[in-house]
Image (cartoon, grey):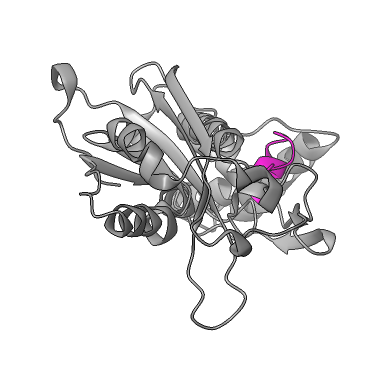
Amino acid sequence: MEVSNSGKEGIAEIVFFDLETNVPNRAGQRFWVLEFGAIVVCPKKLVELESYSTLIRPKDLSVASLKSSRCDGITRAAVANAPEFEQVADKIFSILNGRIWAGHNIQRFDCIRIKEAFAEIGKPAPIPVGMIDSLGVLTAKFGRRAGNMKMASLATYFGLGQQKHRSLDDVRMNLEVLKHCATVLFLESSLPSVLHEKWQGSTTIMTRSRANGKLPCREETSRKSPPISSIGYQRSVPYTRGNTLGKVTESVRNLLCKAQGKQPLNTLLKHSHTLLR
């Protein structure tokens, strides 16, 4: 994540944007932008300040599918009467230029398509003052507990509904996913010994596959827990259920009887700490 301090009044606004394109199905076929959608967000309050979306007619109309496999997908008929990219380029430039760009996998896909589209019409492309690619940020900070880290999987994980694969809907979903991930990470950093251990104890989660419905996906727990010294309050022992507390008490009593007069105090404390973890 790269952030610059430049922008209006010293604070740059964040623009979440997304492109819908054709899917090249033969050698030499290029990507064409079929839809652009964006929301401008206040970085301090995460409220939506502005939104814009438009369908875009490609120069080669045949690249758009006659029918879409999705109920609200983009078809050839939908873009037939839409403006060409050159007609909306100034508006797209004004929304993107000089702001922090945010989106899911935008560094590898959307940013490249934007540059290609502006180069096609011979105009300079907009320039961001920072970049937040939620795919990389969430993979590094949140881990792969939601599976393959696609937007559809993340949305399913948090119960946010099904991804529509329409630009404006997807960027709003992207923002909600980031809010949910940030909240979970904040709670875990507040009680790392309680909440993070619960993640480590979980073995499987369910995520939606594009092709086969729901499939089990193994959870990875490589993300380190925040340092204990950074929190103000921490429970040393998680909440117990059933006879867990009785079992721990009995184990401690047996250890005390066994260790009495035979082991030094520091060894006893070491084993007791192991039991209470």
Within the magenta stretch, is there residue 157?
yes
Furthest toward the bottom, the residue is 27
User: Magenta span covers which residues?
Assistant: 153-164
Measured as percent of width and height from the top left, residue 121 is found at 30, 54
Measured as percent of width and height from the top left, residue 26 is found at 59, 80
Residue 274 visible in the current orientation: yes
Residue 115: quadrant of the picture: bottom left
Measured as percent of width and height from the top left, residue 197 is found at 60, 45
Q: Is residue 243 left or right of residue 191?
A: right
Residue 240 sits above or below residue 113 on the image: above
Q: How many labels, in total? A: 0
Viewer-proximal residue, 166 or 254?
166
Viewer-proximal residue, 183 or 275?
183
Picture residue at 79% right of the left edge, 56% below the top: 69
Q: Quadrant of the C terminus?
A: top right
Picture residue at 39% right of the left edge, 37% below the top: 88
Viewer-proximal residue, 236 or 66?
66
Furthest toward the front, the residue is 81
Measured as percent of width and height from the top left, residue 268 is found at 52, 51
Residue 74 sits above or below residue 100 on the image: below
Residue 277 visible in the current orientation: no
Q: Is residue 19 left or right of residue 153?
A: left
Within the magenta stretch, is there residue 73?
no
Picture residue at 48% right of the left edge, 44% below the top: 18
Q: Is residue 13 left or right of residue 83?
A: left
